[in-house]
Amino acid sequence: MSPARRTRFDPRSILAVLQAAEVQSVLIGGFARVARGSDEVTGGVDICPSLQPANLARLDVALGEMGAAGEAPIDETRLRAEPVVDLMTGFGELKVVPTPAGVPRGYEALRPGASAEHLGGGLRPTIASTGDLIAMSAALRRPEDLERLPALRRILELEAEPARLVAVQPPLKLPRALRPGEAEESARPAHLRRGGPARGRGIDR
């Protein structure tokens, strides 16, 4: 990758183009961990796409719109030959990872646990679950990935805890509608109301 081709990293624009092109993919890697709550800095977007031919065609169109048209076409043959396709777009680095470490079935295995998350501005990328992000980091076994595991496991624990921060308030009891005559009766002094003076608990003794 030539330094001359490097550009400012704009992950939101990358995700916006993929979303507009209706590319079916799961966000993985550093940006996915950040979206799940990890405290780290990342300089690229990693995706695991569906390998359906129609979807790869949409991905190829999206890459053209991002300024990566000079690269070889993205098709199943290329993705099976290259475990990681590292591309430089007009918005920064994009890695296409068909079979991430620890998840050999790729998109088909990641999609059930993933969830679409609101990132503002209409962006709703499908992001790998924290559990799958842990599996991928553990499978890579690089020192930097292993160092992230405790924080990711803590995030997983927090996701599993029930929400206890907001106390459940009892339902508000609204007054019932008064029946005819009750309005006048309630306005009278207590000792003149029907039933006479209050009894018990030492009242009026």
Image (tube, rainbow, N blue to C red):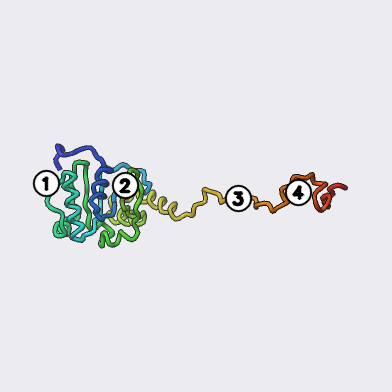
Q: Amino acid at mark 4?
A: Glu
Which residue corresponds to the image point at 21% horizontal and 61% vertical from the top-left?
Answer: 52
> In the figure, is residue 177 to the left or right of 16?
right
Q: Amino acid at mark 2?
A: Leu
**Which residue is identified by label 3?**
172
Q: Where is residue 130 shown, x and y percent of the image?
A: 36, 54
Q: Amino acid at mark 1?
A: Gly
Q: Earlier in the sequence, mark 1 or mark 3?
A: 1
**Which residue is identified by label 2?**
123
> In the figure, is residue 198 to the left or right of 33?
right
Q: Where is residue 69 shown, x and y percent of the image?
A: 13, 47
Q: Nearer the viewer, residue 56 or 156?
A: 56
Residue 202 lies, with reference to residue 110, above or below; the image says above
**Disc 4 on helix, strand or loop?**
helix
Q: Nearer the viewer, residue 12 or 148?
A: 12
Discs 3, 4 touching: Cβ within 8 Å? no
Q: Earlier in the sequence, mark 2 or mark 3?
A: 2
Which numbered disc, 2 or 4, marks the residue closer to the eye?
4
User: Separation of disc 1 and disc 2 at Cα?
Assistant: 27 Å
**Disc 2 on helix, strand or loop?**
loop
User: Separation of disc 2 and disc 4 at Cα?
Assistant: 61 Å
**Which residue is identified by label 1?**
70
Q: Where is residue 56 shown, x and y percent of the image?
A: 19, 56
Q: Nearer the viewer, residue 129 or 56?
A: 56
